[in-house]
Amino acid sequence: MSEDPAEQQDIPRPRWDRRYPGWYQRELKAFADAGVSPKIDEKVLTDGRLELTFDWPLGDRMIPLHAIYPDGYPEARPHINLIDPALFPKRHCSPLDGNLCLLGRDTRQWQSNWTVPKLLQEQLQAAMEGGGDEDPQGEPAEVWWNTNSLPDSYCLIDSDWSLLNAKGPGTLKIAYVAHIDKDSERPVLCALVKSIFDADGNEIAAWNGPWPSTLQSGAVREMEITWVRSAEQLLPTPMMHDQTAGLGELLKGRINATHGFGFDSTSTRGHLVATLYPAETQFRHDGESWLFVLACGKPAAFYPGKKASPPGKKGPEISAFVIKTLRAGKSDLSSRASATATLATKSVALVGTGAIGAPLAIELARGGIRELRLMDHDTVEPGNTVRWPLGSSAWGRLKGQALADFIAREYPATNVTYIHHCLGTYSLQSGTGDDSAFEQALAGADLVIDATASFGLTSLIQEHSRSRFLPFVSLYATPTVGGGVVALSMPRSGCLVCLEWAWKDEPNVIAAPPGMFEDGELIQPPGCAERTFSGTFFDLQELSLQAMRVVAGFFAGGVPPSSSVVYTLAFEDQDGIRAPAWRKNSLPPHSRCSCRR
């Protein structure tokens, strides 16, 4: 039997007190020691949760607070909310519910041996009065608005726009798609701001980023709406939980009944209004943000004086919703990964979109490569997808085409093209041979990548690359998938044949990866035209990721390296788990290789 009195008496207590018996009483004792008597919400306590309300002394005043203990307490921090909106400080407080930011986001700042009284003693005064240490983190108001926004809806803006001195009110040209969700019956609006005009009709900003696939269909429409400027930062209030009531003031006098738009349901009409306001976009950095509010209702609701409602019957109403403000300009998409910023101006040709080429193509697109040309001829079979990045939606499709369509849809900043060609063949139907296929793929490229993992084809691709003085990256696994190679070959330095000579003549300098000269276990799945190797996606992807690092580093370096480089992968077994280990070597021209001639 447990020695815990609460367990013996089976009294209601928080779930976390069952993991740490006695901590509930420890928490209540900490309040008593501080001279505070909290009120326990007995209803939620019967469900194993703890919520307390109490007045906490701060100087010569009492602060009414509401403490919510999560199930993960004490590993997870408690939530402390101010009850009186009049006490909400300008910073470190949610304007929606008064949740106080007493600690930074880093979970290590919360100490699991603390209690709520200890937390308040340490941090409440600084949070309420704006003193003490704080994380160098801004508090964009749009975050609060977006918290209570319409699901699945957004309007895109660009952080590079600078409109603090723009003369308003003006107009916005919006590209959008809209429909009514059949399940929730709520509107869905996806949009971007194409152009911004000031009060004099001058265009003062324009969209220069990629268009998401949602806004590239034939259903995209355009509308023009007015925007106004707010001199003060706009913040939601607790009334935002009742959206229509909380947004009424923002809509007042702003709806133009003749400039609304229809959804896919003729019985619903929408009107969008926009407000530009000053905001802290980064820590102590003044910028601006937008608030987009959508008003929806029956057409008659926007003409209240046109037809009176019958006595005793309520007329049609207007509902209001916040549309998420999302930042998707070019700098917004690259700011989180500055190491790939130079990819935005580069063109890469990738030959081979199999288990190592396809993940690399996606990484290049994720990194924002300007142009990506894919060459392949193979088809996605269901069995391929255990080591290919796309799943059942690609079954039966050409690998390169399926991959190109995915990239075009998910990473619109990349201009991706697919060249359907099998190297070593000539198509009478299309009139395409190797030379014309290479011309399509390599013309204007900044770098060529070979992911065919086929030595004969690798030699052919390398020859076409070197003849155009293009840097060349090749990646492949060994037959046993015991390791692999990622090689960067510069036009006037060592080539992949030089690498083979180095393995033979200088094995102590450049060692071949494990399994390079062994016969791997080949299998022929039923119905497959040829045997294939056995290997997992999570091992093969190590080569794709290293190749991405090589490409990103090559372009970020500014001055191209003069010498070729080879990266050799060896998987080392550690307690039954394969761990990758990389080794780097320079690859100069070998004296016995014909590339020196």
Image: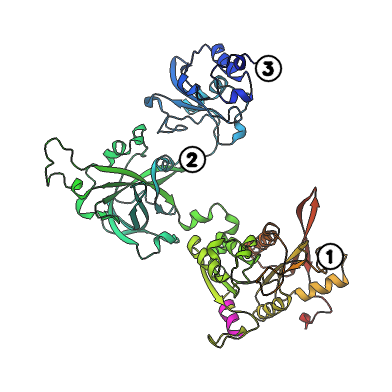
Q: Amino acid at mark 2?
A: Gly
Quadrant for the C terminus in the image: bottom right
Residue 561: quarter of image: bottom right
Residue at 88% x, 72% y is: 505
Q: Which residue is mark 1?
A: 511
What is the crowding at mark 1: few (fewer than 14 residues within 10 Å), some, or many (at least 20)?
some
Q: Which residue is mark 2?
A: 138
Name above or below for residue 82 compared with residue 149: above
Residue 366 is one of the magenta-drawn residues: no
Left or right of 64, for residue 296? left
Query: Disc 1 to disc 3, how far (Cα)?
Result: 64 Å
Mark 2 or mark 1: which comes first in sequence? 2
Residue 536: quarter of image: bottom right
Secondary structure of the residue carrying numbered label 2: loop
What stretch of residues is rendered in magenta?
435-441
Q: Which is the main secondary structure of the residues drawn in magenta?
A: helix
Residue at 50% x, 67% y is: 405
- In the rendered image, the residue lying farthest to the front is 526
Residue at 53% x, 56% y is: 334
Secondary structure of the residue carrying numbered label 1: loop
Left or right of 283, for residue 308? left
Could you tell me if residue 149 is visible in this image? Answer: yes
Q: Nearer the viewer, mark 1 or mark 3?
A: 3
Task: Mark 2 and mark 1 in contact? Answer it, CB < 8 Å.
Answer: no
Give residue 53's position: percent from left, percent from top.
45, 19
The figure's colour scheme reads rainbow
Q: Which residue is mark 3?
A: 1
Residue 439 is one of the magenta-drawn residues: yes
Q: Amino acid at mark 3?
A: Met
Q: Amino acid at mark 1?
A: Ala
Mark 1 or mark 3: which comes first in sequence? 3
